[in-house]
Image (cartoon, rainbow, N blue to C red):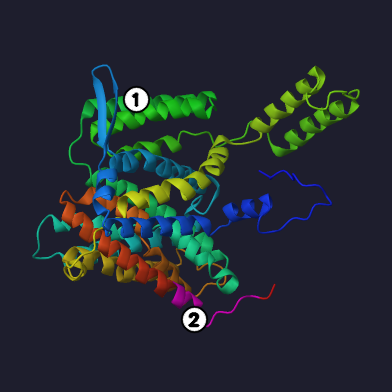
Amino acid sequence: MTTPDVTSPDEPTGDDSSPSALARFFAHPSLPIALLLGATVIALAWANSPFAASYRALVDMPLGVSFGDAALKKPLVLWINDGLMGIFFFLVGLEIKREVLVGELSNARKAALAIAAALGGMIVPALLYTLMQQGGSPENGRGWGIPMATDIAFALGLLSLLGSRVPASLRIFLTALAIVDDIGAVLVIAIFYTDTIALGSLAIGLGVFAVAIVANRLGARSPLFYFMLGTLVWLAFLKSGVHATVAALLMAFTIPARTRIDRKAFVGEVGKSMTTLTALPPNDNDRLNSPEEQRVIDVVAKKLDHVQAPLQTLEHQLYPIVKRAVLPVFALANAGVAIDGSLGASLTHPVALGIGLGLVVGKPVGVFVFSLVAVKLKLAELPNGATPRHLLGVGLLAGVGFTMALFIGGLAFDDAALVDVSKVGILGGSVVAAFLGLAVLGIGSKPKPT
């Protein structure tokens, strides 16, 4: 959307205060990372300030809705984690579907390197974490899924800081790796972090999901219609015991991914409409369209709808909402770990050490080794212009777990103290992995001349 120019041609404008400058600020690619970091810093500062009690009171504040005898009541943090994060997982599902249809996961050869790297980046950290918990409490062992996670927003944002210092193909590789990683994370959540399942509620949810699939086949394209079905599936999964965000990801696969007309037909039909519009007599009213003008415009609007795939439209609309609102709110509600005199004990706790080593060592080793093995076996090939050093650097950036790791950490442990310890390991490990990744990728690299 462009910002209208409200100044006259003779009126001086300052770049720093003009609407276009403000629009550029909000469109800046680094803004989502800045918001996420800002929310994290605020949460940490608030949780360790004299007002820490107000932070806990806010995130634990009970909220609910009721319809007659039916009621749903949860603390605010769970509404964020189970509800608001559903939008995030829905977007992840849209991205996965697009990549499977036309992207880096659309055939085995293109997907091989990303799949191998993601598998290594999940298996090695999980094993390393598990080894670190030997001889400890069985509860500690439940956190093995935490260091498997990659925060795609942070990882890609950090990679973008290097600009032309790294091959452009690395961004595609890291995106595909992170998406496969997300698939693994959702499977882990659905299978291993679901304690009890209410089969009746699950059957209802799957039944409504099936209705959405049939509706897709019959040509239903209204986002509102799928939102209503998705809400029912979300509620049913929530009541079933299967994590509700799985429902959001499943619903993404029911969104139509095809256009009704192709570009050639669109250009031809809109061209006819433009010819008709141009031939209409002048309209004396410059604020309202004439009936004839409006009829032509309605036809063009319908053609615009037909030439757009609902999947791409929703992905485009949701991306800024998720990156600039959903994820910062999630960080604000989940990153507020109290750091007191026990920080040293938290840093050396087996859970924190396991997560930290999993992210900083397990992720890059897994990505690096599994990728090279896939290349040596001729199952895949390196991205254009990439070297083994680039694979190691990408593996380190994949060790920035943050959002997804915090999410899994909240599911893994029932003990609030262990949740806080896991947050220390996640934050510490992600920061170290980020700096090491940038250092490895930036060593000896110079920007390409433009």
Closest to the camera, between mark 2 and mark 1, is 2
Q: Is residue 72 above or below residue 291?
A: below
Q: Which residue is identified by label 2?
A: 443
Q: Residues within 10 Å of mark 1 (few under 14, many from 20)?
A: some
Q: Nearer the N terminus, badge 2 or badge 1?
A: 1
Q: Residues within 10 Å of mark 2 (few under 14, many from 20)?
A: few
Q: Is residue 430 above or below residue 251?
A: below
Residue 445 is a magenta residue: yes
Q: Which kind of residue does numbered mark 1 sit on? A: Gly
Identify the secondary structure beneath mark 2: loop
The residue that appears at 35% across and 71% down in the rendered structure is: 432
The range drawn in magenta is: 438-448
Instruction: Name the spot of residue 355 as percent of width and height, x first.
Output: 25, 64
Q: Which kind of residue does numbered mark 2 sit on? A: Ile
Q: Which residue is identified by label 1?
A: 207
Instruction: Name the spot of residue 24 as percent of width and height, x first.
Output: 63, 54
Identify the secondary structure beneath mark 1: helix
Q: Nearer the viewer, residue 445 or 58?
A: 58
Quadrant housing the N terminus: top right
Horizontally, residue 80 falls left or right of residue 6, namely: left
Q: Nearer the viewer, residue 59 or 282?
A: 59
